[in-house]
Amino acid sequence: MNQRIQLASIDDQRNAAAREAVRRRISWPVNLTPANVTYHSRGHVVLIGAVQPVIAAARALQHQGLASLTLLTLNDAAELPMGSEPVIEQPLSAEQLAQLTITGHLGAFHLQVPFSQGETLDLAQVLVERDAFDVVLDLTAPGMLPAMPWELPPPGYLRLAPEAADEQRQQVLESAVELVGEFDKPRYFQVNTDLCAHSASGNVGCTRCLDVCPADAITSIKGRIESRIEIDPFLCQGVGSCTSACPTGAIEFRLPETRRQQDTLAAWLEAYREAGGEVPVLRFVTHDTLEQERQAGVVTPGHLIDVPLEELGAAGHDQWLTALASGASEVRIQLHEGMPPRLSAFLNHQVALAQGLLAALGHAVERIQLVAANATDARDALPSLLPLSDTAVSFREPNKRTRLNQVLARLAALGTPSGERQALPEGAAFGGIDVDSSACTLCYACVSNCPTPALQAGGDTPVLSFLEADCVQCGLCEQACPENAITLVPGFLAAPARETRHVCHEEPAFECIGCGKPFATVSTVAAMKTKLANHPYFAGDALARLEMCEDCRVKDVWKTMMRDPDAQLKV
């Protein structure tokens, strides 16, 4: 349904009143997590750069209550008179600076340079006899230091370009002085490893959260067999792109849970309609942008309902589609200046994904749009289309994927699905699998590795079934299959078959030659006999043990040992 709006019928005053009623009735959930991450900074500051900017900055920082100043300068030693705090001066060559590594965060920065024979020197230990520096002040020119892995610098890392204006220079230096003491912040996210599709049986699957974190706070930790996702709470800055990218809901905000945002969107739109509002447009916007607009005296039109976020990554295609399925005419994502490149790329990918899903379900793709920073006309414009629905989605359970499937089903009912598989941007968590029946032995390695209910075994019946709606295209089934019988089929299937479980492969059961109990498939037994034919344990007549169930096989082994006790030594 893509009916166009008659613009003359829109009453902005009534819409503004409805929007105010929504704000009074239902508050947007905020992160109420108690501060449980604490930074400890004693004020040991390290300054890095050419001699002149380092000396100038160090002079401004002297007598400010810092514990020490360490000056790492290019080639020449800095000559700075001693102040109330110790000053440590260490020249480094251009080659050493180019190989300098910086890791950590406020109160725990480690700076290391290569030493002889592959060893490294920890500069904090060598120069100030401490485990780490507390604050890093980077005054280097472009190219002087190696590229850092993060796009959002960690807390305590301050960047001051040598050509910075006086006002900016003063602000950065004041920040360095203020970063002394204890500082608390929320532990933004939690990880549910039971839902995570990152790894199984030594194979690595989904890496979407790793790919989108601009703070480089997420790592894959290799265990003895499995790998697991960990979020460093000291590096995490609550951007939220990881929770939006996670297809299973394994990563989510601690408080409020991501699903509470989704519930609130639906409740807002319901309340807006009850108050007499028409053609609502939801604008996803940061608190900082809203504050800038408030200070500038900006008053947006009544049909525009703002969804305030700490950062735009905290909402993705599932939340935007929820808004449309619950009666929003359009969704607009208000960009702002200074966004990390990885976040910008993530939002563009999410919009392309959402628009692809809309197209597959028969809806206009312009219902979801990015709005450039300061693009007031695009921000305030009346929507060109009427809402798809006048009833909000009522969610039945908390599971993220199930909720998204419910939203997609609502949109399918409101549109005209293509009935075909729609190509989506690379990495989208939608698609099916192709199972080669001639190769599959129904070993169920794929089932045991699948992080969702997408793949299931048949119980007592040798059957492999698949539900595409639950598949997140992590690839773990494809990697786990010992017969290479599974191939991923990416893309969104806009047809009822997506929500219908179907049989991928089935075989008759093989019955034990000893007791007659079905215990495997015919192809599994045949594959085992081929692969184990030369094993001493199954030599000669013992090959028949592969045609026995586990109980009969043990009994046969004991019978052999009773007749010939030395037989076990031959294995």
Image (cartoon, grey):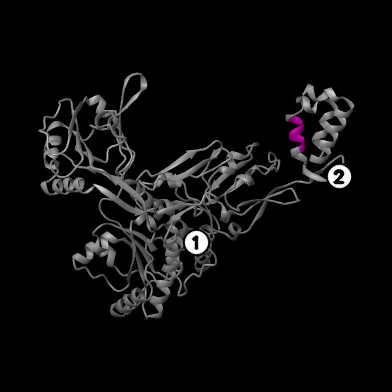
Are there few (<14), some (14-19), or many (20+) residues within 10 Å of tag 1?
A: many
Residue at (16, 38) in percent of width and height:
85
| Residue 394 vertical placement versus 243 (above, below) | below
The type of residue carrying mark 2 is Gly
Comes first in the chain, label 2 or label 1: 1
For the magenta stretch, what is the residue range? 525-530
Label disc, if present, on residue 516 of the rendered structure: 2
Q: Nearer the viewer, residue 408 or 226?
A: 226
Rendered image quadrant of residue 478? top right
Point out the frontmost of discs 2 and 1.
Answer: 2
Amino acid tagged 1: Leu
The residue at which mark 1 appears reads as: 361
Q: Position of residue 140 (x, y in %)?
A: 20, 35
| Residue closest to the eye, 192 or 548 | 192
How many marks the image carries: the answer is 2
Q: Nearer the viewer, residue 452 or 70?
A: 70
Name which quarter of the figure residue 328 lies in.
bottom left
Q: Is residue 549 visible?
A: no
Give x and y (percent) for residue 518. 81, 46
In the displayed structure image, the side of residue 494 where residue 377 appears, left or right? left
* Residue drawn at 79 percent across, 21 percent down: 570
Circle 2 Cα neighbour tier, 10 Å, few/some/many (<14 / 14–19 / ≥20) = few
Q: Distance from label 2 to label 1 (Cα)?
A: 51 Å
At a point 64% along the width and 40% down the height, the residue shown is 485
Q: Main secondary structure of the magenta part?
A: helix
